[in-house]
Image (spheres, grey):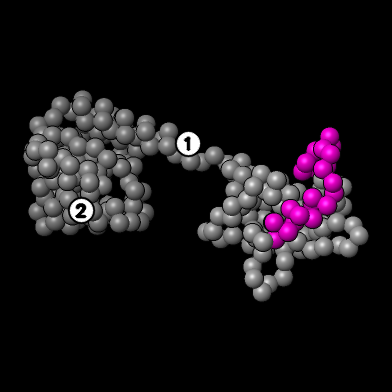
Amino acid sequence: MSKILIIEDEKNLARFVELELKHEGYETEVRHNGRTGLEAALEEKADWDVILLDLMLPELNGIDVCRRIRQVSNVPIIMMTARDSVIDRVSGLDHGADDYIVKPFAIEELLARLRALLRRIEIESEQNITKQTTVIYRDLVVEKENRVVRRGDEVIELTKREYELLLELMENVNVVLARDVLLNKVWGYETEVETNVVDVYIRYLRNKIDVPGEESYIQTVRGTGYVMRS
């Protein structure tokens, strides 16, 4: 059940929209001025799915309400107003509204816009929730599906070989991996590359992931290969 906040000072219109939305299965609340509407919109536990926001409101106009909501929330907003000028529509959209409907409107149009907006948000959410398998070593995080390496908020740019070499080491913490093993895992069994190429790429990798003045993430085991130790 989607939760809709209606911020509208025309009480008859607000009541009509509220009843129609409830009839369609939405959970609704109504506020009749900009200040109480803003307070309801920003209420932490409310978790609104859409806000229907009138442009001309007492105490605080719809543009200001929309702008303040956008400072802290991406909740979808549909502006409702009797002012149909291009400037008003552009101003509403520029301040963060997702859609705009002009009074008087047919309730069927409002319902259609609501469904379209909710459908779009649902699709975007599904696309953003692609599960990432993560591998973590100290403060390094690898997102395997994205093939992204991070240290905190910093993305570390690696080549394909550097990424695969790092991932192999991170997935085998405390296991000493010989040069020929790394060569086979990262470059493939059919490669004719010499094992010293592993040393070269370890150096490239260290230059990108190591923090100056701190111990290297990758330890050298002389005569054997490399390891990341916990």
72 is within the stretch colored magenta: no
Give, as a three-letter code, the residue at label 1. Answer: Glu
In this rendering, the answer to whether 159 lies above or below 85 is below
Q: Nearer the viewer, residue 147 or 130?
A: 147
Determine the image quadrant of residue 22: top left
- Residue 65 numbered mark, or none: 2
Is residue 4 visible in the rendered structure shown here? no
Q: Farthest residue in the bottom direction? A: 213
Is residue 191 visible in the rendered structure shown here? yes
Q: Is residue 15 left or right of residue 2?
A: left
Q: Residue drawn at (24%, 37%), measured in percent from left and top?
A: 99
Q: In the structure shown, which secondary structural element does the residue marked by tag 2 occupy?
A: helix
Q: Residue drawn at (72%, 70%), measured in percent from left and top?
A: 215
Tell me the crowding category of disc 2: few under 14, some 14 to 19, or many 20 or more residues within 10 angstroms, Cα based.
many
The residue that mark 1 highlights is 126
Residue 170: percent from the left, percent from the top?
Answer: 73, 53
195 is within the stretch colored magenta: yes
The quarter in which the C terminus is drawn is bottom right
Residue 186: percent from the left, percent from the top?
Answer: 77, 43
Instruction: Report how far apart the C-alphas of labels 2 and 1 lie in the structure.
Output: 29 Å
Q: Nearer the viewer, residue 141 or 41?
A: 141
Q: In the structure shown, which secondary structural element does the residue marked by tag 1 occupy?
A: helix
Determine the image quadrant of residue 81: top left
